[in-house]
């Protein structure tokens, strides 16, 4: 890793047939007031390869496209992209996220300042006034997106979150490399969902912490590509919560997760959503058995 310029930032964007969303994301990167050193675009087996969709003048910074021939999930995509990182800081940006032009400029001091800070995020919005996520919290044994559904300016979201969301986050590369397992920063078996919670748990065990920049600097369309996973994606969302709780005792509680899923399954059954109830049940069983 080069440390000749401590302000250098690489960005990773994982794409799976992101269409116009990917272009909007990359355009927001191209106008950053603190331009990244390089953008690493991971093509996760898109039907129409990314290189065929990008115009040569879209990005004003060097970029590289690496392609997986099959979809390895968000986790596999990020792990592949991390092999290309050379900068002391690295940002992960969902392909359906649009960054304010000051996103890097305002997050970099939060991560690069004093103290053992592994990463930071800003407030991520669902729309112009509604929060999607302002960090990750653990409440009564269950993982929560801080601020979800609240209006911007609400006093209820915290400024020092337990963890940060991988939707759009800036990390210290050293911290990620420190907790990598056999060269992989994220657990590839997660594929997608709650991989950021598991990563934050590993980082916290090593004494790292996280910061929230309490400004709305990201607009998130929400699971633009992941929605194509359908019931498989829903099953993974359920399953991975239990995998985190089992791998990191005290980070979530099995009993609390089961109580929440039982309540949700009952609502599914009462609403005649039998397929969702069965998928949830299968996700719980897989999570309890998964190693």
Image: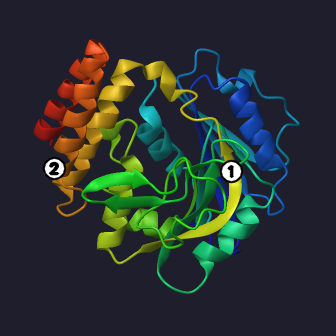
Horizontal relation, residue 90 to residue 106: left or right: left
Name the residue beneath numbered marker 1.
218
Q: Secondary structure at mark 1?
A: strand
The image shows residue 186, relative to residue 46, as above or below, that is below
Horizontal relation, residue 278 to residue 107: left or right: left
The numbered mark, 1 or 2, whose residue comes first in the sequence reads 1
User: From where the camera sits, is residue 126 visible?
Assistant: yes
Count of marks placed on residues = 2
Percent coordinates x, y for residue 241 in the rendering: 27, 45
Marks 1 and 2 sit apart, C-alpha to C-alpha, by: 32 Å
Q: Residue at x 52, y 67 (%)?
A: 119
Q: Quadrant of the N terminus?
A: bottom right
Within 10 angstroms of label 1, few (less than 14), some, or many (20 or more) residues? many
Q: Residue at x 56, y 87 (%)?
A: 114
Q: Pick out the residue farthest to the bottom.
A: 114
- Give the quadrant of residue 15: top right
Q: Residue at x 63, y 53 (%)?
A: 151
- Any mark on residue 254, and which? 2
Q: Pick out the residue farthest to the left.
A: 289
Q: Residue at x 55, y 27 (%)?
A: 225
Q: Quadrant of the C terminus?
A: top left
Percent coordinates x, y for residue 175 in the rendering: 45, 69
Within 10 angstroms of label 2, few (less than 14), some, or many (20 or more) residues? many
Nearest to the observer: residue 9 or residue 207: 207
- Give the quadrant of residue 4: bottom right
Horizontal relation, residue 8 to residue 285: left or right: right
Q: Pick out the residue farthest to the front.
A: 270
User: From where the camera sits, is residue 183 visible?
Assistant: no
The image shows residue 67, relative to residue 187, as above or below, that is above
Percent coordinates x, y for residue 276 in the rendering: 30, 20
């Amino acid at each position: 890793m080069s440390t000749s310029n401590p302000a250098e930032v690489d960005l990773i964007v994982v794409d799976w047939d992101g269409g116009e969303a990917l272009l909007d994301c990359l355009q927001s990167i191209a106008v950053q007031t603190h331009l990244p050193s390089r953008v690493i675009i991971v093509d996760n087996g898109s039907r129409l390869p990314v290189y065929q969709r990008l115009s040569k003048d879209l990005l004003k910074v060097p970029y590289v496209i690496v392609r997986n021939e099959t979809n390895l999930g968000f986790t596999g995509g990020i792990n592949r992209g991390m092999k290309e990182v050379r900068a002391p800081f690295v940002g992960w940006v969902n392909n359906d996220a649009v960054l304010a032009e000051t996103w890097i400029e305002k997050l970099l001091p939060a991560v690069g300042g004093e103290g053992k800070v592994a990463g930071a995020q800003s407030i991520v919005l669902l729309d112009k006034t509604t929060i999607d996520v302002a960090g990750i919290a653990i409440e009564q044994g269950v993982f929560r997106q801080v601020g979800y559904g609240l209006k911007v300016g609400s006093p209820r979201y915290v400024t020092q979150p337990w963890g940060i969301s991988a939707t759009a986050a800036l990390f210290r590369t050293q911290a990620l490399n420190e907790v990598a397992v056999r060269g992989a920063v994220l657990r590839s078996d997660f594929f997608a969902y709650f991989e950021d919670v598991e990563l934050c748990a590993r980082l916290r065990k090593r004494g790292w912490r996280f910061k929230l920049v309490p400004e709305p600097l990201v607009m998130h369309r929400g699971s633009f590509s992941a929605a194509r996973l359908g019931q498989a994606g829903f099953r993974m969302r359920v399953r991975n919560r239990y995998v985190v709780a089992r791998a990191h005792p005290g980070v979530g509680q099995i009993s609390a997760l089961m109580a929440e899923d039982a309540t949700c399954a009952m609502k599914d059954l009462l609403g005649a959503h039998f397929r969702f109830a069965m998928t949830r049940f299968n996700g719980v069983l897989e999570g309890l058995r998964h190693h």
